[in-house]
Image (tube, rainbow, N blue to C red):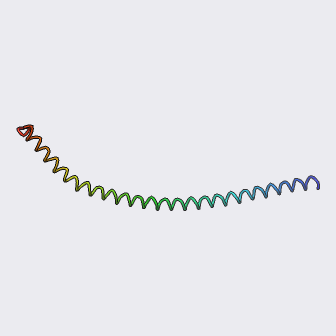
Amino acid sequence: MNDAQIWTMIGAFCALMFGMLTVVSTLFVRVLRTEIGGLRTEMNGQIGGLRTEMNARFDTVNARFDAVNGRIDGINRDVQALVKRTFGLDRE
């Protein structure tokens, strides 16, 4: 082999290596994007389910609080009346 053939073989080898590097990196990026897209879809579904469950539980807590709050307001009124009567604060 002479110098021209050696440089041609070196050039062909470099072109082959850069081509393989391009193909492998392109396929890797495509697979990575697909996996991230699938993960994003799954996470959005999970977060949506969690949001629905938490809203339902907050609604339950709010309903119970409203029911208890009415009773607490009644107790508060009674305690204030007792304090006023006991300490003579009803003269105001």
Q: Residue at x 20, y 50 (%)?
A: 72
Q: Residue at x 22, y 56 (%)?
A: 67
Choose between 72 and 38: the one closer to the eye: 72
Q: Position of residue 71 (x, y in %)?
A: 19, 53
Q: Is 73 situated left or right of 47 in this image?
A: left
**Which quarter of the rendering shows the C terminus?**
top left
Q: Is residue 38 above or below residue 81?
A: below
Q: Residue at x 91, y 54 (%)?
A: 4
Choose between 9 and 85: the one closer to the eye: 85
Q: Residue at x 73, y 56 (%)?
A: 21
Q: Position of residue 85 (x, y in %)?
A: 7, 41
**Which quarter of the rendering shows the N terminus?**
bottom right
Point out the residue furthest to the right here: 1
Q: Position of residue 15 (x, y in %)?
A: 79, 56
Choose between 89 and 35: the one closer to the eye: 89
Point out the residue furthest to the front here: 86
Picture quadrant of residue 19: bottom right
Picture quadrant of residue 12: bottom right
Choose between 34 and 73: the one closer to the eye: 73
Q: Is 10 situated left or right of 36 in this image?
A: right
